[in-house]
Amino acid sequence: MKNKEMYRMWELFIRENKMHPDVDPVVQKSWIRSKNLHVNPFLTKGKIVLKGEMLYQRQQEKSTLINISSPLMESLHSLVKNSGFIVVLCDESGFLLKVIGDKKPMEKAEKINFLEGADWSEEAVGTNAIGTAIKENMPLQIYSCQHFTLATQTWTCSAAPIHDADGKIIGVLNMSGPSDKVHSHTLGMVVATVKAIEYELQLLNKTEKNEWMKSYLEEMTNTLGDGILLLDKNGVIIKTNRGLHKLLNMKPGQLEGKYYAEVFGNQTVQEIYHLKKEILNQEIKLSLPSVHSPVHVLLSAKPILKNNMVIGHLLTAKEIKKVHQLVNRVSGNQAKVSFAEIIGKSPCFISCLGEAKLAAKSNSTVLLTGESGTGKDLFAQAIHHASSRRDHPFIAINCGAIPRSLLGSELFGYEEGSFTGARKGGNPGKFELADGGTIFLDEIGEMSLEMQVLLLRVLQNREITRIGGNKMKSVDVRIIAATNKDLKKEVEKGNFREDLFFRLNVLPIHLPALRMRKDDIPLLAGHFLQEIAERTNIPVEPLDDEVLEALQNYDWPGNIRELQNILERILLKCQGGKITLDLVPGEILRDDRAKKPEKELPRKEKIKKQALIESINIHQGNLSKAAKYLGISRSTLYRQVKRYGIE
C-alpha cells in the first residue's frame, strides 16, 4: 500500500472517526486504543522521560538484558550499515535503553526524541512498532502513516518483544529506517535476533541456577553436623564438607584429590567402599595423623548410580558421642529437677540439702541412702542439674527392676551375635549413652556380685567392654548410686563387695524419713495438693488444722511417696469441696488415735459424746438420720464420731 493511500486512511480516522476496511486489523485496534488514550495525533516528537540518574538507574536494572543484547544488536546493525536504519533496545514499558546507528539516521532520530530515555509506549505516542508490539505481545511492523502520530510517519519500524524463561516480556528489540525502505525481511531479521537474545538469556538463567544450586547444596552440606565425603568411581576424594574437617581436625581441601585408601587405612572403610551397596550406621574408629586419638563414628555409604552403573560413593560419618547426645535429648534422658524444686525446711533436711549442693560441685561418686520414698531420685537429678555436667545426659537405671541376666547388656551394651536375639550391629549400653554426663544407679543393693565386679572395673579404669566384645571403650561418666539397704550390713552378709562399697561411698548422703521431718508435712501437703489440682483440674482449698494434725501424727512408712498418693486420693474424693477430717483415710486416723491415748473428757464433752452415741443407736447406725435428729450436718457428725472414737 502506497504512503499516500495510507495517509488518506489515517486522516479519515483522525478527522472523521471512520475506519477504512483496508487498514490492517492490528493497526485498527491500536488506533482505537490511541484515540481512547487521548494521544495527540499531531505530535512531532516524543518525550524523553528518563534523564541523568533516572536513566542510569533503569539501565543498571536492565544491565543483564543490555549486556546480552548489545553484541547481537551490533551484528544486526552491521547487516544494514549505511542504509539509514538504527537498532533500538527498549524495556517492557517502552522506554528506550540503547540506540545504535549511523550518524545521519541518529540525527534524524534525535529530532523526534527517538533517544535513550524516551517513552515510546502506546500511552505516550500512540500506534508504533515498540508500544504496539508490547500491547499485542507479538512481532510486528508499523510503517508510514500506520503510525498514529506525525512524528514517526516518515519511518518504518520492525519490533519484536523479548521474553524471559517464564514467557514474560522483559524488553523489545526494534529496527527503524526510512519508510520507503519497508521490507518484510527486516522484521524477520529482528525476530531472529530476538530469538538469539532469548536463547542467551536462557543459557545465563540455567548457568545462574546451576551456580545457585551448587552454592545452596554446598552450604547445605556444610550446615550438617555429619561429616560428608564424596568419592568418584575410582575412589578419589572429590568433595568434603565442614563437618568432616571439624571431625578429623583437617583444613578444607586437604583431602580432595587423594585416593581414599591412602587416607583411610581402616579395613572396614575399604570393605564398605567395595561392597557396592548401601551401608547404614556401621560403627568404626577412624585413625588419622591429624587426630590425637581414633574418632569413634557411625559410617554410612551409598553408591551413586547413573544408568545402573556406579559412578561414585557418598560416605557420611556421625560422631558417636553426638549421636548419643541426640538420642538422650529425644528420649528425655535429662535431669528435670533442680534444688529449687526440692521442698523442706526441717534442720535435718536442710543439712542433707547442703551436702547435696556440695556434691554437685565435684565429679566424685555419690551414694544416696534412705528409706523408699524419701526422694533419692530427686536428689540425684538435682545434683546433676547443678553440676558442670548439666548439659550432658542424665540416665537413670533401676538395678532391681531389670533381670540380672539382662542388666549387664543394659549397662555395658553388647556386640552383634553375642547372644540370641542380639540386635544387628550391636547396641550401646547406658554407660556409653551417658558419656560426659551422669548415670544414676538406683537400688544398687540389688545388683548381682557378677555385675558388681564389672561396675568396680568401670569405677577404677573409666572403661567399659560390651558384652561379647573385646574392645575397651573410654567413658567419662559420673556415678550417683542409691539404695534403701544398709550396705555395710550387706557387705557383712556377703551380698555386696566391700571394695565396691568403698568406691561408691565417697560422698555419702543419708536422706531422712518423713517421720523425722514432720514440720515439713504442711509445706509438702500444700505443694502436692496444688500440683495434683492442676493436673486433675479439681479446685482445692487449704487444709484445716484437724486434717493437718492428723497427717502430722501419722508415721508415713511409705514416706513422701505415700503422702503424695494419700493426698491425691483425698482430693479425688472431695471433688473440689473443703477437705475435712471425714475424707482422711481410716488407716491414717486409726494410727493417729493409737498414738494419742484417750484422755479423761471434760463433763461437757462427755455429754456431747453420749448424745452422739444415743442418737446413732436410736437410728440403728443411720448417720444421716442421727445428724438430722441432733440438728447438725452429716460431715460434722462424721468429724465428731472420729474425734470421740465412736465405733
Image (cartoon, rainbow, N blue to C red):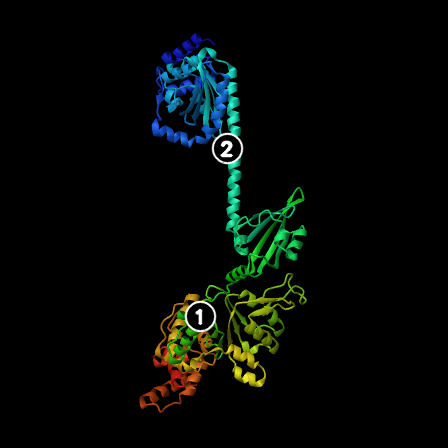
| Side of 22 where 279 appears, left or right | right
Q: Is residue 107 above or below residue 299?
A: above
Residue 43 position within the rendered picture, expressed as x and y whole percent measured from the top left: 35, 16
Residue 35 position within the rendered picture, expressed as x and y whole percent measured from the top left: 37, 19
Q: Residue at (65%, 61%) from the top-left corner?
A: 424
Q: Which residue is mark 1?
A: 382
The foreground one among 352 and 81 is: 81
| Side of 411 where 539 appears, left or right | left
Q: Quadrant of residue 457?
A: bottom right
Residue lying at the far bottom of the rendered structure: 600
**Residue type indicated by callout 1:** Ala
Gap between marks 1 and 2, in whole Å? 62 Å
**Residue type indicated by callout 2:** Asp
> Closer to the observer: label 1 or label 2?
1
The foreground one among 475 and 369 is: 475
Compare marks 1 and 2 and give the one earlier in the sequence.
2
Image quadrant in which the C terminus is located: bottom left
Q: Is residue 148 above or below residue 270?
A: above
Q: Quadrant of residue 357?
A: bottom left
Q: Secondary structure at mark 2?
A: loop
Residue lying at the far front of the rendered structure: 289
Q: Is residue 519 above or below residue 298?
A: below
Q: Which residue is mark 2?
A: 166
Picture disc at residue 530: none
Label 1 Cα neighbours within 10 Å, binned few <14 / some 14-19 / many ≥20: many
The foreground one among 169 and 54 is: 54
The foreground one among 40 and 228 is: 228
| Side of 223 where 124 appears, left or right | left
Residue 630 position within the rendered picture, expressed as x and y whole percent measured from the top left: 35, 81
Label 2 Cα neighbours within 10 Å, binned few <14 / some 14-19 / many ≥20: few
| Side of 312 where 246 appears, left or right | left
Residue 15 in view in this figure: yes
